[in-house]
Amino acid sequence: MDPRILDRLSCPVCGQSLVETTVGTARALRCGRRHTFDIARQGYVNLLTGRAPHVGDSAEMIAARAEFQAAGHYDVISAALAAAATEAVARLGATPPAPPPSALCSASTDATLTAAHCRTEGSRAKDATAGVRTGQPATGSEAYPLVVDVGAGTGRYLGAVLAALPDAVGLALDVSKPALRRAARAHPRAAAALADTWQRLPLADGSTAVLLNVFAPRNGAEFHRVLDPAGTLLVVTPAADHLTELVDALDLLRVDPDKADRVAASLGGHFTPVSSTVHRAELALTRPEVATLVGMGPSAWHTNPTSLAERLAALPEPVRVRVAVRLDAYRRR
């Protein structure tokens, strides 16, 4: 594991620092009290303590998400996060503010964007390690900013942010093993770990420069503990008009009208909101792409396959769909 990432981890059992070691022929991480955590052959480390109350997204859901994201349909989210993270790291004094990479679109407040204009660098950076500091790891988020994506899924968004921050390293956390198998390969400067959002996160206090939370659960107390005092929490949630064209047509789950208030309430005791923007993109999808979109999200748990197929067949092609998300930035109280 990259020592700059390992330097920021802590044992989820006792909180001590971790070192990489070997157990037989396998690699593992171990703390001074000999709590040991296996590194899977697929590259992620299991930092879960006990059994998770759930196993996260299934392999089928993750495969659908990877396919849909690879087509660039959600690059509006990647671009917004990359721009916001670049600004957040500039505040730490680690990286001077720079114009967004040419491959990233400018996701301004309430902007309507086409997917063709929102291609992110995340999947095609040619020299992903350019500008990375080498040598002994320094301390403090200013030295080599750590970006952590909690509920990272495939790691697509983390990869896009790291492509925009050449001095940063990243960590993908998720409870889904199929997700982590992909996230471990999301970017050369990223690592991945199995962890439950509702348990103690396997990170040292104040270790994280930027915390990403995209369509995922939020643990305000733990987010506050691991975030640098000058760091930024970036939360992405669906806006009221997200995928509305499909909700009625396919009988999908609706966005909770009180979603924004609930998110703010879950973080209010620990964080202060500093900005909120809405980012939109208009998509023109085929029916198979719509099926993939449904299969990658929470509606996959609630739809009847036969009924869904019938409803899909009735949709005219191309299927016009609006992506609409809120990006809220928070700082520690």
Image (cartoon, rainbow, N blue to C red):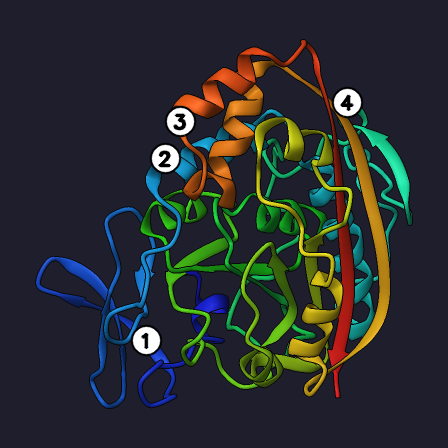
Per the image, the residue denoted by label 2 is: 60
Q: Which is closer to the viewer, label 4 or label 2? A: 2
Per the image, the residue denoted by label 1 is: 19
In the depicted view, which residue is nearer to us: 29 or 65? 65
Mark 1: amino acid: Val
Sequence-wise, the earlier of marks 4 and 3 is 4
Mark 4: amino acid: Ala
Sequence-wise, the earlier of marks 4 and 1 is 1
Sequence-wise, the earlier of marks 3 and 1 is 1
Marks 4/1: CA distance?
A: 44 Å
Sequence-wise, the earlier of marks 2 and 3 is 2
Q: How crowded is mark 1: few (under 14 residues within 10 Å), some or many (20 or more)?
A: some
Please tell me the numbered disc located at residue 116.
Answer: 4
Q: Where is residue 109 in the image (x, y as percent from the top left)?
A: 91, 49
Residue in the picture at 69% in, 36% down: 243
Image: 316 above or below 7: above
Tell me, yes or no, if residue 89 can be seen here: no
Q: Which is closer to the viewer, label 1 or label 2? A: 2
Residue in the picture at 36% in, 35% down: 60
Report if the CB atoms under discs 3 and 1 are less than 8 Å apart: no
Per the image, the residue denoted by label 3 is: 305
Q: Position of residue 197 (x, y in %)?
A: 46, 70
Q: What element carries label 3?
A: helix
Image: 2 above or below 18: above
Mark 2: amino acid: Glu
Sequence-wise, the earlier of marks 4 and 2 is 2
Q: For the C terminus, give its image quadrant.
A: bottom right
Report if the CB atoms under discs 4 and 3 are less than 8 Å apart: no
